Image (spheres, grey):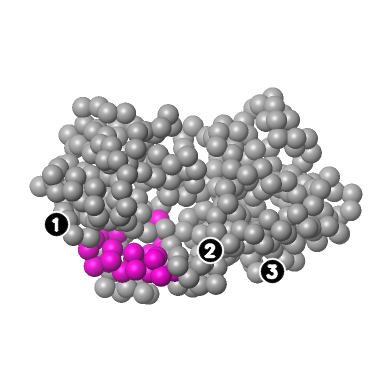
Amino acid sequence: MLIGFDGRLANDKHRVGGGQYCSELLKAMAPLLGEDRLIVYIDEEPKSFFPLKPSSNVDIKILGKAKFWTNTLLAKALKKDHPDVFFSPSLQVPWFVNIPKCSTIYDIAYYDFPSEFTWKFRVKAKFQLYMAVKTTQIFIAISESTQKRVLSIYPELESRIYTVLLGVDRNIKRTPQERQIEIRKKYHLEFPFFLYLGRIQPRKNIIRMIEAFELFLDTNTNSPLHLVIVGSLGWLYEPILSKMQNSKYAERIHYLGYVEDEDEKIALISSAEALILVSLWEGFGLPIVEAMKCETPVITSNCSSLIEVVGDAGLLVNPYNVLDIKNAMEKISLSPELRQEIIIKGNERVALFTWENTASQILGLLRKKFSK
């Protein structure tokens, strides 16, 4: 079977969310191809971190850049190569190419939380999903939560949508203490801290997280804890940056921007008192699984896919309740026994999430549906 694959997201310098999914999936899929072949389409030269190199069953085609790339240059290449199936790690698919297609859906939160998105994004996202439904044969949802929500909007996808959970890099593990100290010195973090990791945008609920941290410090005046925020700027980020800068505890809130080096990112996770991800929704919530691998406790929301991912291996909070978030911070910081219990449960749960499993399930589905 010949598989076409849109690899652009894996070539993006800021590989979060879809970019990480695309990169890890390509990396895990290549060794499982067997007699199958893969054509990876990108729009510029592969960067140093691109996960694959050409081989006997992997071809990388650089198509160049163009407006409406998916429906112009990619569509032209697919008509020429005619793979048995085209796989997209997003909802971007060429609409007018008569080739079976498989798309990935992370979430459709723009239906449930319209105020968290710009109107242009909402219109574009809804139209993109509509066109994918009309032109794509099967879909991969990255959680049961996402699959159920999609089916509530498009029930006709019942027989065409499959849940395949994400994985975590098998090489991720807790960073040795010496390396943690080195990275903390680099970023001037020579104190204990809670860590947020993700884009800076409204749905991540960062303002309530900061309010909870302020309340935590109000009631724990001797606590040495700081709050470290890591991530690239998304949309509607201005009020979030303003909240960081104008907090009464601004000197204890540290925004590092995007940390490109994966080793440094893992060292920061390993160093944290806890990873805090109290989003209003997540399609999956990959930083949670990375924290489990690093033996770092997790505080996360009791909604969307986050419940599926964390199970009983973290503290679940109501993301709309600042006091609830604050209380979880308190429990984690004041109870070594609870921390250890959560770490042990995380070690057990993280075994469920591997990119090899993700790639194997997707390849198996493509073979079953489209292999000649």
Q: Is residue 343 above or below residue 304?
A: above
Q: Earlier in the sequence, mark 1 or mark 3?
A: 1
Q: Is residue 101 above or below residue 272?
A: below
Tag 3's secondary structure?
A: loop
Q: Which residues are magenta?
A: 122-149
> Quick one: 233 or 176, which is closer to the camera?
233
* Residue 127 colored in magenta in the image: yes
The residue that disc 1 covers is 98
Q: Quadrant of the N terminus?
A: top left
Tell me the crowding category of disc 1: few under 14, some 14 to 19, or many 20 or more residues within 10 angstroms, Cα based: few
Residue farthest along the top direction in this orientation: 178
The residue that disc 2 covers is 281
Residue depicted at x 89% and y 53%? 221
Tag 2's secondary structure?
A: loop
x, y percent for residue 140: 33, 56
Q: Earlier in the sequence, mark 2 or mark 3?
A: 2
Which amino acid type is marked by label 1?
Asn
Residue depicted at x 25% and y 36%? 61
Residue depicted at x 26% and y 40%? 63
The residue that disc 3 covers is 321
Magenta stretch, main secondary structure, is: helix
Residues marked 2 and 1 touching at CB (< 8 Å): no
Which amino acid type is marked by label 2?
Trp
Tell me the crowding category of disc 3: few under 14, some 14 to 19, or many 20 or more residues within 10 angstroms, Cα based: few
Q: Determine which of the numbered discs, if any, sits on residue 355 in the image.
A: none
Residue farthest along the front direction in this orientation: 67
